[in-house]
Image (spheres, rainbow, N blue to C red):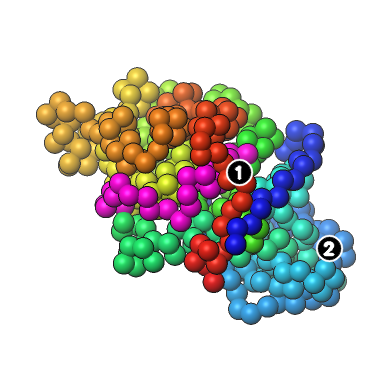
């Protein structure tokens, strides 16, 4: 049985400033902030003191945990719970401080609260329903450490995410081979759990969510399948805003850390040494300005992954990621990136010394996506441009002719049972 897509009206708000996944890596990215503007903790008492003064409800008075935990990460443990008032299931995320000995509260949690509660109300962005506290955190005797560990984020409940769907499909159709292992087998057959019309719908929903974020001057900085929830009614929901950051949209803004975005979905400007930046990317403490295009490159990777059923670029290290990127997308333009021999693998250096181009965006990438129309291939290449200034914005991508040609975006999406998720 297919599920009709519900169309919701967006709330118009002024321009101001993850929900849980059934996976231990869902709760927070492995990336850690490194520059002064991105400290990983902040003082609890000065920022979250209202939580200890009875403003937030007690978690025990309204929610009952159902079953075991459904996710766990660096900054939180996620449970499925029942809301006793609405009789609906919710996702309960208990915040865990990164440094137990510190009195600081994770900045990633503060960002997620601020982003989801204040600004981003969109049908394709996970809804933060409220913030609750434990009995101990709400008491007058609560210490800073007790209060920090007694804060719960209450999200709408989504039973699965895109990564789990793709993994399940891969296990069922590729002799239980994981997606990370499958990328070496570039089969031209259709190997996605979604048909082309449904892929268009998912891509549109993701672009719509990111366009909304960018309109509100927010970079997500960790777009990947495990941060894309799939609701019971077939709606894609962008989640986990712990690494999100306000951005002016200009490239001359204050430097930001490059240690963001999971490796497989990381834009080239975060991997290569980009000309015009003050510091080299080879230093772990380096930082420079980047903007919304890093989200767009991630979307391009996710789009290709939905189509082929496994990651487009699945390097185990940054050097291997660069190697795979160059083989798939071609050599980065010398006018833009410092592509020195020290950043090249032995395989790349051998090809470079022969004068041969390493990969071709019109051949290697297109060969992997030969099931697509010309417009579908064009969308992929424009999202995966090396030059961030040439990369399509979310708004431009939504205007792509790809979405207005047959097969048209699906008006119904498959149920979890049809996808193979029990």
At 79% from the left edge and 76% from the top edge, which residue is drawn?
60
Q: Quadrant of residue 410?
A: top right
Which residue corresponds to mark 1?
Answer: 205
The vertical placement of 37 against 189, above or below, is above
Residue 363 colored magenta?
no
Residue 365 rendering spot, x and y as whole percentages: 32, 37
Q: Which residues are magenta?
A: 183-208
Asked if 40 appears above or below 159 in the picture, the reply is above
Q: Nearer the viewer, residue 92 or 161?
A: 161
Which residue occupies the extreme left position in the image? 354
> Would you identify the image quadrant in which residue 97 lies?
bottom right
Q: Is 179 or 288 nearer to us in this picture?
A: 179
Q: Residue at x 40, y 38 (%)?
A: 372
Instruction: Return the x and y of residue 300 as percentages of the image width and height.
Output: 46, 39
Question: Where's the C terminus, which quadrant?
Answer: bottom right
- In the image, is residue 193 part of the stretch drawn in magenta? yes
- Give the residue number, with chain letter if any, for mark 2: 56
- Expressed as whole percent of the image width and height from the top left, the position of residue 400 reads 53, 29
Element marked by disc 1: helix
- Real-space CA distance between mark 1 and mark 2, rounded to the nearest whole angstrom: 32 Å
Q: Residue at x 38, y 53 (%)?
A: 191
Residue found at the far right of this picture: 54
Crowd around label 1: few <14 · some 14–19 · many ≥20 (10 Å): many
Residues at discs 1 and 2 in contact (Cβ within 8 Å): no
Q: Is residue 242 left or right of residue 284?
A: right
State the SS at label 2: loop
Asked if residue 318 is positioned above or below residue 86 in the image, the reply reads above
Q: Quadrant of the N terminus?
A: bottom right
Specify the quadrant of the image occupied by residue 98.
bottom right
* N-terminal-most mark, 1 or 2: 2
Disc tally is 2
């Amino acid at each position: 049985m297919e599920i009709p897509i519900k169309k919701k009206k967006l709330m118009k708000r002024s321009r101001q400033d993850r929900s849980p996944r059934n996976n231990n890596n869902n709760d927070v990215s492995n990336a850690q902030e490194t520059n002064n503007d991105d400290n990983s903790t902040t003082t609890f008492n000065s920022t979250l003191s209202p939580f200890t003064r009875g403003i937030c409800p007690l978690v025990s008075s309204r929610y009952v945990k159902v079953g075991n935990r459904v996710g766990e990460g660096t900054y939180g443990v996620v449970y499925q719970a029942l809301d006793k008032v609405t009789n609906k299931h919710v996702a309960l995320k208990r915040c865990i401080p990164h440094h137990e000995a510190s009195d600081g509260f994770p900045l990633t949690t503060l960002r997620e609260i601020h982003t989801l509660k204040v600004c981003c109300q969109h049908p394709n962005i996970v809804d933060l329903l409220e913030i609750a506290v434990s009995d101990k955190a709400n008491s007058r005797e609560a210490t800073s450490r007790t209060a920090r560990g007694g804060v719960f984020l209450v999200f709408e409940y989504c039973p699965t995410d895109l990564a789990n769907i793709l993994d399940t499909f891969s296990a069922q159709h590729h002799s239980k081979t994981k997606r990370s292992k499958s990328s070496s087998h570039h089969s031209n057959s259709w190997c996605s759990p979604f048909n082309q019309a449904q892929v268009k719908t998912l891509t549109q929903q993701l672009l719509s969510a990111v366009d909304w974020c960018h309109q509100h001057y927010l970079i997500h900085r960790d777009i990947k399948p495990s941060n894309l929830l799939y609701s019971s009614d077939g709606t894609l929901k962008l989640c986990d805003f712990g690494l999100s950051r306000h951005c002016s949209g200009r490239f001359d803004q204050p430097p930001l850390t490059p240690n963001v975005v999971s490796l497989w979905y990381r834009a080239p400007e975060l991997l290569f040494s980009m000309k015009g930046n003050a510091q080299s990317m080879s230093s772990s403490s380096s930082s420079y300005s980047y903007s919304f295009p890093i989200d767009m490159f991630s979307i391009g990777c996710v789009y290709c992954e939905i189509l082929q059923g496994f990651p487009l670029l699945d390097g185990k290290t940054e050097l291997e990621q660069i190697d795979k990127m160059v083989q798939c997308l071609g050599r980065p333009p010398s006018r833009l990136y410092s592509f020195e021999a020290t950043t090249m693998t032995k395989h790349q250096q051998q090809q470079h010394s022969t004068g041969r181009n390493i990969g071709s965006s019109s051949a290697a990438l297109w060969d992997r996506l030969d099931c697509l129309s010309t417009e579908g291939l064009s969308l992929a290449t424009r999202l995966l441009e090396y030059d961030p200034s040439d990369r399509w914005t979310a708004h431009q991508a939504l205007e792509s002719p790809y979405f207005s040609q047959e097969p048209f975006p699906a008006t119904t999406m498959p149920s979890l049972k049809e996808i193979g998720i029990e």
